[in-house]
Image (cartoon, helix red, strand yellow):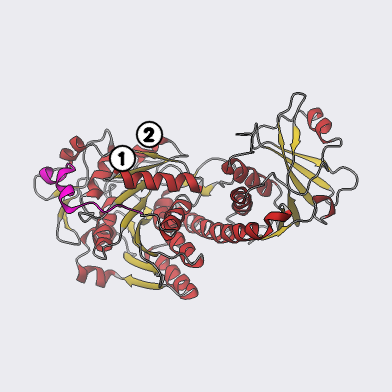
Amino acid sequence: MTELTVTTTSVASLPAEWAVIGVAPGAEGPVPVPGPGTSGSFDDGIPRLLAGLGATGAPGETVALPAPAGIGPGLVLAVGLGPADEPGGYDPEVMRRAAGVATRTLSGADTVALALPARTTEAVEAVALGALLGTYAFTAYRTAAQRAPVRTVTMVVDPGRLTPAQAAVGRALVLGREVNRARDLVNTPANDLYPESFATTVAAAGREHGLAVDVLDEDALAAGGYGGILGVGQGSVRPPRLVRIAHTHPGATTSLAFVGKGITYDSGGISLKPVGANEIMKRDMAGAAAVFAAVLAAARLGLRVDVTGWLALAENMPSGSALRPGDVLRMYGGRTVEVLNTDAEGRLVLADALVRAGEERPDAIVDVATLTAATRFGLGDHVFAVMAADDAFRDRVLAAAGEAGERAWPMPLPPELRRSLDSRVADIANHGERMGGGLVAGLFLREFVPAGVPWAHLDIAGPAFNEGEPHGCTPSGGTGCAVRTLVRLAENAAAGEDPARRIPATAAATDGRAGER
């Protein structure tokens, strides 16, 4: 991983290969935006060169230039920031993306000095995290030599902010490592990442960081009555797993449960996906990867909150033993589900895990899943959906996403759609109305959340996997979506914010569920 250090030394005195500066649109062309340690070092000749090269200073634009005389780094990468968001500077997300663009552009460089205008602790952390996320590349299966990520990044900060800047960079190092861990898992092909190997990976990380890890194999799942996970996994030669990984803190007064969909490959089962829809289905475990990484981050940051991750792992394959449309499953906890569509499998494994997580009576439950194409159609590939039975808790999750720099949008759970999940033979069907399918999936999951435990559902089907070109600090392939949101939610709980106002048990009977079951 790229080494990241902090200094108060001026950029002109640093022995780096490259200096990265921010530029903004000006009346006569792009102009450098002063950053810590720059003190006018880049005013001489840089604006003229930028204008001559047709630069605009637009966000994400990069231009390589020779450094002015007397500057330690011999080369300058000017990164466009766009107009300032406010008189005090730039939004942290602008800084995060600019740093990511810079380090990705400079892959292969040995030493880089970042002199972006990070003048607050929040901005310092955004630049540090963006720089680390921008260095990411998945090369595990490449046989030819690849350009190495930047070896060393030195961040220049104001002298009076050295101590808080070091703490901010420390957090960024942990978060960057865990987001990139989730990316690695999502990018790993399904012939190497399957339920058993995923569980083995979690167990190894648990030992490394001193976390409790419990793995239920197919025999334990059968003995425990986990019909959803077993049903989805029964068509594969690779049996399913349910993994529990827990961070506990002796001073914690709050507990959170994160539940992740971990379909290591999704063919659709007997309800086979159409041609062209299978190629990225290794990504269908991105929710479990996010949960795993978030629990590790909470532990590594020493957060004063108990965080338990539940990874529902299965491979959804067609075969002679596969789940059939029309089959009825008895889920963990006893409820029965008629399976009308075997490609609506994520909600089945999540249902088992939600019931099990609820038995520990956490203060709140959040599930994360690449659950529905419908949500992707509605929100695109850059925004994930947040649904919840309780608006107050949904708003807390949305706030955490905003603080973390991830884009999320509130979605409703319309009670009139619940009727479409009624089954003629079982307690509930796993598939309902096609229109509003993402909302229907949320309504299905809500049925398995214990009354009185606040819950939110994050559908990350769009932003979990980038099929296009890299942008900002987002690579192609797995993105690590939702890790930052979950960690921020845990941090807020550790700081004393009530993560989820308890809902009285009687309220569950008036939220549209009781009369429709």
Q: Mark number for residue 438?
A: 1
Q: Earlier in the sequence, mark 2 or mark 1?
A: 2
Q: Do callouts 2 and 1 mark residues in contact (Cβ within 8 Å)?
A: yes
Give how far across and how far down residue 421 sits, in percent.
Answer: 17, 42
Residue drawn at 59 percent across, 60 percent down: 173
Is disc 2 placed on a helix, strand or loop? helix
Q: Residue 25 — which label? A: none
76 over 162 or under it: above or below: above
- Residue 356 on the magenta segment: no
Does the magenta portion include 513?
yes
Image: magenta residue range: 499-517
Crowd rating for badge 2 (residues with CA inside 10 Å; few <14, some 14–19, many 20+): some
Amino acid, disc 1: Gly
- Residue type of the residue flagged with mark 2: Gly
Q: Position of residue 266 (x, y in %)?
A: 36, 51
Report the residue that reaches farthest toward the front: 160
**Disc 1 packing (10 Å; few <14; some 14–19; many ≥20):** many
Q: Considering the numbered disc 1 on the image, is that residue within a helix, a strand or a loop?
A: helix
Q: Quadrant of residue 200?
A: bottom left
Q: Write the residue at 39% across / 48% down.
A: 397
* The label number, if any, that marks residue 378 in the structure image: 2
Residue in the foreground of this view, choosing between 414 and 504: 504
- Outermost left residue: 425
